[in-house]
Image (tube, rainbow, N blue to C red):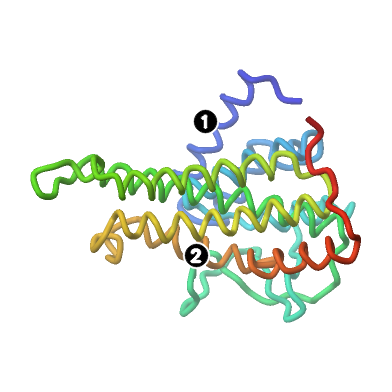
Amino acid sequence: MIDASDLALLSEGLRSAMQESPSADALDAALIELGWHDLLEDSPDEAVALVFGLLGETGAHAPVLNDVLLHAMRRPPGGVVALKEDGLAFGRPCEPSPGGLDPALGLTRAEWEPLTDEALAAGRRALGFQIVGAGRTMLALAREHALARTQFGRQVASFQAVRHRLAETLVALEAAQAALEHAGDPMTAMLGKALAGRAGLTAMRHCQQVLAGIGFTAEHRFHTFARRVLVLDDLLGSASALTGQIGGSLRADGRAPRLVDL
């Protein structure tokens, strides 16, 4: 368990590294320097929530999902793990992949090896936190725009329809965050990733509406996070696919498991 004051300092250092590193490989090295591997070994739940949440919020990328999967499989960090049977993986070193939906992720191909249930759960939880982080930044961008712009002589943020979209986005993100924080087994991790994917897509849809035309431009930051959410949602099971799997499992078992001990 990381002390609250230490966590705040670590968060500040990680955010600075993500904002200042000129490339994914540079950030990968900076995270190692900041103790990412030790943190993952000593406090994996907190490490994943913090690092991947910040990766989502800042829009930065480092191929550290590989480390999460390797740790769950009891292997040393620093390698590359395929996420799908076709070998799709986060490259290390990270070479941008031109033509892709999100070239900065540097998706490449690696030798496929089926992931263990523990690795799948850990990976889904990490991706979920990153999606939620990206959703929070999209929400912040939309809120900032709504507060700054006026229409019909009124602040855009004063319109009820705009407020409803932003509120619905916040509720979806907070629900996903809570589910991910309590995910302790493959089923709850699957649920957390599904909720995160849905929340990310909700944020993308509603915030695009609030931002209106400026949200479609390459000059605005919104598209960076929207693209990131679309790609991350598809990795290790999309929201729609995981929801179907969860439903099938519940029907087969004939009961719903306890997700959180109250």
Residue 231, label in figure: none
* Apparent side of residue 130 relative to residue 246 in the rendered image (left or right): left
Q: Locate residue 53: give its quadrant.
A: top right
Say which amino acid is labelled 1.
Answer: Glu
Q: Locate residue 89: give its quadrant.
A: bottom right
The residue that label 1 is drawn on is 12
Q: Tag 1: Cα neighbours inside 10 Å, few (<14), some, or many (≥20)?
A: few
Foreground residue, 219 or 154? 154
* Apparent side of residue 117 relative to residue 235 in the rendered image (left or right): right
| Residue 79 horizontal/vertical position (percent) | 76, 60
Nearer-N-terminus badge (2/1): 1
| Residue 102 horizontal/vertical position (percent) | 49, 68
Where does the C terminus fall, quadrant-wise? top right
* Apparent side of residue 118 relative to residue 30 in the rendered image (left or right): right
The residue that label 2 is drawn on is 104
Name the element at disc 2: helix
Residue that appears at 57% across and 25% down: 8
Name the element at disc 1: helix
- Is residue 123 placed above or below 2 in the rendered structure? below
